[in-house]
Structure formats: C-alpha cells, structure tokens
Image (cartoon, rainbow, N blue to C red):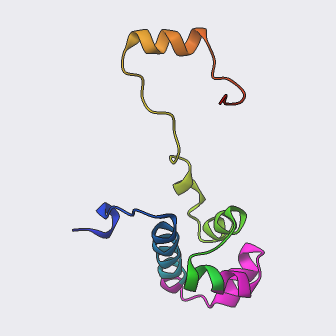
Amino acid sequence: MEPALLTLTTPREMGLSLARRLRELRLLKIWTRETLAARAGVSAASLKRFETQGKASLDLVLRVAHALGRLNDFAEILQLPPAAGIAELERRAAKPLPKRGRV
C-alpha cells in the first residue's frame, strides 16, 4: 500500500506523517534544519519539535511548506463536499451558510 493511501486515525498520526514528509522534502533539498527554519522565518527548535514530535502551529506548518515551495498543496484540504444534485446546489445558492453554528 502506498503511504498516501494509509488511513491515519488520529491527529497525532497525521501530525507525525506530515512532519515526516516535510522532513523528507527538506532533505531532498539538502537543507539543514537551520537553513529551512531561517527560510521559513521560524525557530530551529520549533522546526525540530515538529519534525520529531509532529507538534506545530498551523502557522509554522504553512511557513515551512511555503519555504519548501509546497504551500499550494494545502489549497485543496477542507473543501465543502460536492452537492448531491441540482436541488442541493439551488438550496446552497438561496441560503448561504450561517456565520456560526448552533447547539
């Protein structure tokens, strides 16, 4: 099974997988952590924590992706699901999403 097809079941697993891939991209460029950290505008310690523990702020992840030339990879995540049909498209057009959820 290809790594991209693995089902990651927890946020921790996803964080570690993303950290591993970003680390591999860094190494393909033959950059040290310090080089990538400087290019991304983040601390080397924060980058190390991300690469080893999978823990980072979204800002750090996006800055690192940008420095690696991979920021556009994030453009497709968390998209609304496609409409099931014409009726749903019409409903979405007639009634925009609420600004906040209700309990």
Q: In the depicted view, which residue is nearer to us: 78 or 8? A: 8
Is 38 magenta? The answer is yes
Say if 48 sits above or below 54 in the image: below
Q: Quadrant of residue 84?
A: top left
Q: In the depicted view, which residue is nearer to us: 40 or 91? A: 91
Q: Where residue 12 appears, x then y in whole percent?
A: 51, 70
Q: Where residue 74 appears, x then y in whole percent?
A: 55, 54
In the picture, measured across the screen, residue 80 lies left or right of residue 103, that is: left
Q: Quadrant of residue 13?
A: bottom left
Q: Quadrant of residue 85?
A: top left
Of all residues, the one furthest to the front in this rendering is 103
Quarter occupied by the N terminus = bottom left
At x 77% / y 82%, what residue is drawn?
Answer: 43
Q: Where residue 46 appears, x then y in whole percent?
A: 71, 81
Q: Where residue 23 appears, x then y in whole percent?
A: 52, 81
Say if 37 sits above or below 87 in the image: below
In the picture, measured across the screen, residue 77 lies left or right of residue 50, that is: left
In the picture, measured across the screen, residue 38 lies left or right of residue 74, that is: right
In the picture, measured across the screen, residue 46 lies left or right of residue 27, that is: right
Q: In the rendered structure, which segment of residues is drawn in magenta?
A: 27-48
